[in-house]
Amino acid sequence: MQFKAPRGTTDILPEERPYWRLLESTAERIAENFGYLRIDTPIFEDTGLFVKGVGDSTDIVEKETYTFKDRGGDSLTLRPEGTAPVCRSYLENGMNNLPQPVRLYYLVPNFRYERPQSGRYRAFHQFGVEVFGEVKPYVDAEVIEISWQFLSELGLNDLSLTLNSIGDKKCRPGYIDQLNEYYHLREKDICEDCSRRLANNPLRLLDCKVETCQPIIEGAPSSIEHLCPDCESHWEDLKSHISDIGIPFEIDNRLVRGLDYYSRTVYEIAPPIEGRTSVITGGGRYDGLIEQLGGPMTPGIGFGMGLERVIENLKRNQIKAEQNERDIVMVAHIGDDALRKATTLASQIRRHGGAAMVGPSRGLRSQLRYATSVGASHAVIIGDDEISTGAYKLRNLRKSDQSEATAEEILAFFSSSKD
Ligand code: HAM
C-alpha cells in the first residue's frame, strides 16, 4: 500500500517554495513596517478556547474542528483559525498591561474538516494580524490597509474590498429582533440550513448561498440602518479613513462573516470570481471577545488571509515568484582521494558563509547533470590530475565557461560569493 497525503492537504514541494518565500517575506516586511510584532501560538489549544472564542453555533466549531483527547485525557483542538489563540496569549501573557494598542501578526497553519475543493483545504495557511486596545476606527482602516497593501504589492490589482458594520451589543439585539420577525414571516420559504440557523444565529441567514433564499435576503432589513449613534459614527469615520488612504470599497449589507465574535466592522477582499472559496481575506472587529475569554473589556480587530488562495490568484494572473539565484557550487570528484578533497572543500566554503554541496558518487557526466538539476550555479571538478597539479576546474554552469583555480582561490571566490 502506498500512502497519500490526507484528503484536503497538499505538500509544498521545492518548486513552490519561491511563492511561499515571497509571501512570507512580504508579509513580515509589511506587517513590521506598520509596527506589528510577530507572534506564534501552538498548533493545538484547549478545545474550550474555540468553543467559547469562535462560538459553538459557527460552522467551524459545529462541524469542522479536528478535536482529539490526548493521552492524559484532555480535549485538544488543532487551530482552525488564529484569532482566539492570539487573544488567549494576549491575556495569558499580560499583554493587556502593556501600553495599548498591542499590534501582532502571524503566519500559521490552520486545520478545518471542510469539504475539500479548489481553494478550500483541510490544512491551509494564514497570514493574519490582530490589534488590541484601540476602539477608534483608524485602526480598522489600518488593518484593512495592511491586507490591501500586501495583495497590491504582490501585483493583485483586480481585487475588491467589501465592507459592512453589524453593530455592537447595544444595537445588534434590536436588529436581530427585526431580522427574526422578518424571517419568521417567511419561514416556509427558506432553506433547511436557514431554518436551523434562525433559532441560534439569524445573522448567518444573510450569508446563505441557496438560490431560493436570495430574494428573501434582498428584502431583509440591513444592519447599517439599525446602528446606534456610537456605531454609526464609528462606521462613518471608518469609511472616511479608508477613502483618505485611497482604497476603493463597496458596501455589502449582507456581509456578516461566519464567526460569532464580530462586532461593528466586518470586511472581505475577494477576486472577481464568484463563491465563498474565492475570498482571500476576511476580518473584522471583535470588541467583546477578550471579555468573553475572561479578560477586561478590550477592543480588538484583525484579519486572516488564506495564503494558498493568494498563490492561486498569483498564478491566475500569471505572476511568478522569483527563483533564488544565489550561487551554490557542487564539488564533483573522480576517485576516493578526490571525494575527500571535495567534502573538505565544500565544508570550508560553507563555514566561510558560502553554499556548497558534494556531487553524488557517480561518473562525472552524471554528477554534472545532477548539478544542473538541483540548480547549482557552479561545479568544481577534482580528479587525480587536479590533485597533483593543485589546479581544480571551476565551471560556471549558468554561463557554460570553465577556468582553473586553486582550492584557496575557490574558497575565496565562494566565501564572498561574487560572480
Ligand atoms: P475566516 O474567514 O474563517 O476568518 O478565514 C480567513 C481566510 O482564511 C479566508 O478568507 C480564506 O482566505 C482562508 N481560509 C479559510 N478557510 C480556508 C480553507 N479551508 N482553505 C483555504 N483557505 C481558507 C478567520 O479565520 C478569522 N480568524 C479572521 C480574523 C482575524 N478576524 C479577525 N481577526
Image (cartoon, grey):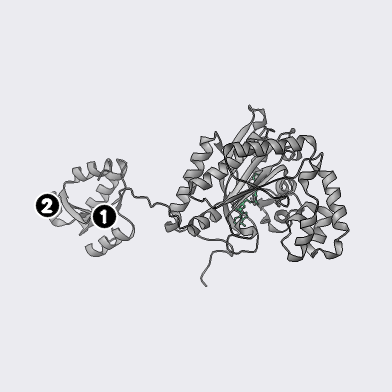
The residue shown at (73%, 52%) is 254
Closer to the N terminus: mark 1 or mark 2? 2
Q: Please name the amino acid that badge 2 sits on.
A: Ser
The residue shown at (16%, 51%) is 403
Q: In terms of depth relative to the viewer, which is nearer, 156 or 54?
A: 156
Q: Is residue 94 visible?
A: no
Q: Which residue is mark 2?
A: 388
Q: Please name the amino acid that badge 1 sits on.
A: Arg
* Eye-nearest disc, 1 or 2: 1
Q: Is residue 330 above or below residue 26?
A: below
Mark 2 secondary-structure assignment:
helix
The residue shown at (27%, 40%) is 416
Q: Is residue 400 above or below residue 239?
A: below
Mark 2 closeness class: few <14, some 14–19, many ≥20 residues within 10 Å? few
Tell me the tag on residue 398: 1
Q: In terms of depth relative to the viewer, which is nearer, 357 or 65?
A: 65
* For residue 19, side relative to residue 374 (left or right): right
Residue 288 position within the rendered picture, expressed as x and y whole percent measured from the top left? 75, 39
Q: Quadrant of the C terminus?
A: top left
* For residue 174, side relative to residue 137 (left or right): right
What is the distance, in whole Å, between disc 1 and disc 2 at their CAs? 28 Å
Q: Residue furthest bottom?
A: 1
Residue 302 position within the rendered picture, expressed as x and y whole percent measured from the top left? 64, 42
The residue shown at (51%, 46%) is 152
Q: In terms of depth relative to the viewer, which is nearer, 39 or 166?
A: 166
